[in-house]
Each structure stands twice: as structure tokens, then as C-alpha cells.
Amino acid sequence: MRETQAQMRTCDYDVIVVGGGISGLLSALALGKHGKRVLLLEKGRHFGGNCNSYRVDGFQVDTGPHAITNLQKGPLRVLMDKYFDYIPNFVDYGRYYVRTSGGIKPIPSNLREFATFDPLPRMDRLMLSQAMTKALTLATFGTDMSKESIYSWLPRNLSEDTYSFVDTISYFLSGKSMKETSVYRVLYGSSFVRDSMMYEAREPTIPTLPATPNQLTEQLTNIPYQLAGQLTNIPYQLAGQLTNITTLSRLVTNRNTHVQAYPAGGLKTLTNSVLYSLPDNVVIRTDTCVKRILVDDEGACGISTDDTSYSAKTIVYSGFAKDLPLMIDDLPADYRCDLKMIDQSKSLCIWLGLSQKLKEFDYMGSEVWYKEKAYWAMPISNYSRTIAPAGKQLVGFMFVVEGSVKSETARAWDTIHNVFPGIDRFIEMTHNQVTIPEKASVTVDGYIPDVRTPVANLYLVGTDAAAESMGITRAAYSVVDLLKCMSEDGCLG
Ligand SMILES: Cc1cc2nc3c(=O)[nH]c(=O)nc-3n(C[C@H](O)[C@H](O)[C@H](O)COP(=O)(O)OP(=O)(O)OC[C@H]3O[C@@H](n4cnc5c(N)ncnc54)[C@H](O)[C@@H]3O)c2cc1C
């Protein structure tokens, strides 16, 4: 237990949360429900960060196409069940497809499906299956795969198409090529190792809430939750009984893969659910950029903005960990060096508002194109009638940006035109977003900081403070870790 005098002194707040993306909001919600006086400051005009939606010419775009993973037993589900007064209504995600010149085909989610995945040559499929089985076997029995690149695991004599396919999957799992992406990311970011298994280790550590139930909670637990029926019918019973052996068997038996979903009404519904659930002891502000994290002999003790400062016993930082050295003067030199090693990638999302529903996008889920400039596309208006005007369609195409945004945008449009000749006739709205999807990519050489920092009373949350899973689920993992660490450090009692 790390109890300091700072926790005893009089402060403006118990906790200041820097940043109002999903990780900052989830932290503020959980800490508020534990009775902490919380101040959350967001530099942008809106809360949600990369987890939001907004209207453009009658269409409701998200901050990038999103599939929310592991809602069966992952960290987000646990946080929702424990702290949310309002739980979003989720729609089952559907499937992942690969688009070829002949149309779309489901991407295999287990080895049996992989055996018949004919866009890739048969020999390649066989060799890839062997490589995957070996990697999973080693990972299952404890070998650290975080420093092994995907490329280093591939046989050397695969066809160009197969390398291109694996490279594309790597890019969409980590934002990086197969030479940079770690095997760990594929195993723990794809369907082969369930988040529920990773979550097992954390579950007992979430502290119990004080016994003052929010009156709304009971009424709202009965709101229709579309996934509930499907979730209870999943044939693969993991809860509480996962062993290494059952994990291996999933290579053959897994049909359902992760339970993935999309929030009906758009991504903002998730952010709004957190906002609506915040108790009165949580104060939130937009348009407030935190410039400095203040530190005294006891550790972090407050923050300052351009025109004011606030003191607090604990600071939870959800901005880029990479930026911490700009906010605190005397971080230990080795920690500064580590933070410099954080790897990131940039994405371009092109939203197309279409004047009618096209048969090419008549599916639930998303598609990948792995030739030329690869994309990941998702027709999000198929999930909810409110996302596009009646009879119209909204599709988001996500590309990884490695060169200049201008040249990558031009290449992205070339791909869209090559794959869907004539699509221009139907486009009535386009909207581009350039973003950093995750604050730290899970690469072979990249650094992922811990939730605990070398500065007492300063914690990190967000996608650069956890390595497991992806995106929002990954951010939720960091919040679960935060609660565990603060509880161990005596800051939650
Ligand atoms: C194109 C795209 C596709 C994606 N696809 C998926 C997907 O399919 N599934 C999935 O789960 N995830 C996906 N993600 C990722 C997911 O949206 C993010 O990982 C997640 O929302 C990140 O949350 P966060 O809280 O860690 O960070 P952020 O959303 O970056 O939030 C950080 C917040 O802190 C604020 N801030 C930073 N510094 C300061 C400061 N000094 N003072 C005040 N405020 C500050 C920022 O303004 C921001 O609002 C995708 C993201 C993109 C962009």
C-alpha cells in the first residue's frame, strides 16, 4: 500500500481526470461511484475523444468505423454492469468479410473455415495454419510473443497475395505492417484468444461499491438489451472454467469468435451512457486544456490550465502518455526514454453518404480490401435507421496513413474507384477524418507504459496504458487496472 501525506491534505478534489475520451469518462464514472469528488477536464469542445458521432449533411458519422469487442465478459461489460445507470442498446456486429473481384467472402474465424478460404492458395493456407497453431500453442503455454513479429512467424515461400492479406490484417489490428506488429497482437486482438480469458486475471480486483445504490439503476436494468438473448446462447461456455487446453481447442471449434457489437444510434450512445450515469460528485468541463501536472514532494498534487490551477490527491491522465514530459519537469530520465519508444499510427477515414442503399453493402459487419491500398469499410447505417436519411446509406472506409495525408488520400480514392467503379454517381456527402486510433500501437519495439507511473499519485489510463485487446475494450482494460492499482495504493477506500 502506498499511502502518502498528499492523500491526507485538503484538496479541491479527490481526483482530477485529464481528458474526457472514453477512458477518462469511464475513470471519472467509476471513481465518482466510489464516492470520490472528481473533476474531469477535456480540452476539446465535446466529450468522447475518439468515441463519438456527429452529423454531416444529414448523415451521422462516427469517429471512424467501430466494432466494440468482447461484450460478453470483457472489461467494458464489467464496467457497464457495475457503474452504468444507462446501458446502450447494442446490435450484434455481424461478420468480417474480405472483398475480392468476385464479391465478399467471410474472413475465417477458426482453422476449419480457414481450410476453405479460397481467396488464398491452398498450400499457403496450410502453411499459415501450421504457423498459427504453433504460435498459439507457445503463447498458451506461456511463451512471451510480444517481441516476435508476425512476419518472423510466416513461412518464407508464400505467394504475394498471401503476404498482402496478412499485412492488411496486421495494419488493421495495430496500424503497422506485419514486420512491426507483434504476434501477441494477432493472438490477443483477434478472435483466437478471448478477452474473457484475459479478463479472468482482473475480475476479482475490481473494488466493491459503497452500499448506496443509485435509485435509477434498478429501474434501468430492465431496458431491452438486444444482445442478451444471443449472449446467453453462445455455445462456447467460458465463464470461470477456461483452461489452456480449451483455448487451444478454439482453433477448431470457435464459430462465434468474439461477441462484438455496435451501439444502436451510433458510437456517441456509449459516450452518452457514461455521461448520463455520472453522479453529482463528478464535475466535468469541456474547452479546458490541462497544461501542467503539478508535483510536490509527495507526488502529483494538482494541475494547471492557462488561467487557473486545482489541487487533488490523485491525478488520472488520459491524454497521450508520450506528451507527459511536456507536462511534468522532473520525470525520471529512464521513464522519459521509455515514453519516447511509444509507437503510433495514423488513420484516414473517408465517409461516403450514398443517395441509395447499394447491394454491394447489403450486409452487417465490415469488409477488408487487401490489394493496392488496403481498406477496412463498414456500412454503419445498416445498424440503425437514424444514421442516414431514409433510403440512403452511410459507409466509412478506413485507411492507414504512412505517407503525407494528401498523397494517401489520393491513393485511398483510387482504391475506392477501382473497387467500386461508378460509385461517384451515388455519393452525395463525403467527410474525411485523420486520427490516431490508439495512443500506443502494439508493435515489436513499441513501449506500453503501466497504469502506475514513477510519480506517486499519478496514474495513466487509455489505449497506451494497456496492451490487451483493441480500442475501446483496451481503454476499458486500463480503467479496470486503474481501479485495481488505486485500491492497492489505498486511494479508493
Ligand atoms: C478510425 C478509427 C477506427 C477505430 N476502430 C475501433 C474499433 O473498431 N473498435 C474499438 O474498440 N476501437 C476502435 N477505435 C479506437 C477507439 O476509438 C479508441 O481507442 C478509444 O476511443 C480511445 O479512447 P481513449 O480515452 O484512450 O483516448 P481518446 O479518445 O484519445 O481520448 C483522450 C481525450 O483526452 C483529451 N486530452 C488530451 N490531452 C488533454 C489535455 N492536456 N487536457 C485536456 N484534455 C486532454 C483529448 O482531447 C481526448 O478527448 C478506432 C479509432 C479510430 C480513430
Image (tube, helix red, strand yellow):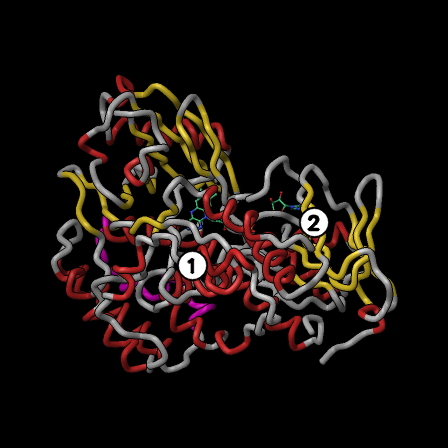
The mark that comes first in sequence, 2 or 1, is 1
Q: In percent of the image, x 48 and y 28: which residue is there? A: 406
SS label for mark 2: strand
Identify residue for label 2: 283
Residue type, numbered disc 2? Val
Distance between mark 2 and mark 1 Cα atoms: 25 Å
Q: In percent of the image, x 54 and y 56: which residue is there? A: 463
SS label for mark 1: loop
Relative horizontal placement of residue 339, taking residue 2 as reference (left or right)? left
Report the front residue among 382 and 444.
Answer: 382
Observer able to see residue 324: yes
Q: Which residues are magenta?
A: 145-161
Identify residue for label 1: 221
Q: Is 151 in the magenta?
A: yes
Report the front residue among 102 and 482.
Answer: 482
How far across and how far down the image is residue 20, in percent?
A: 62, 47
Report the front residue among 89 and 288.
Answer: 89
How far across and how far down the image is residue 288, in percent?
A: 72, 40
The crowd level at tag 2 (other Cα within 10 Å; few <14, some 14-19, many 20+) is some
Q: Identify the image quadrant of residue 378.
A: top left
Q: In percent of the image, x 56 and y 56: which residue is there? A: 26
Nearest to viewer (mark 2 / mark 1): 1
In the displayed structure, 209 sits above or below 388; it is below
How far across and how far down the image is residue 282, in percent?
A: 67, 53
Figure quadrant of the N terminus: bottom right
State yes or no: Cβ of the residue under disc 2 lies below 8 Å from any atom of ligand 1. no
In the displayed structure, 376 sits above or below 255; it is above
Looking at the rendered structure, which numbered label has been put on residue 270?
Answer: none
State yes or no: Cβ of the residue under disc 1 lies below 8 Å from any atom of ligand 1. no
Observer able to see residue 329: no
Residue type, numbered disc 1? Thr
Q: Main secondary structure of the magenta part?
A: loop
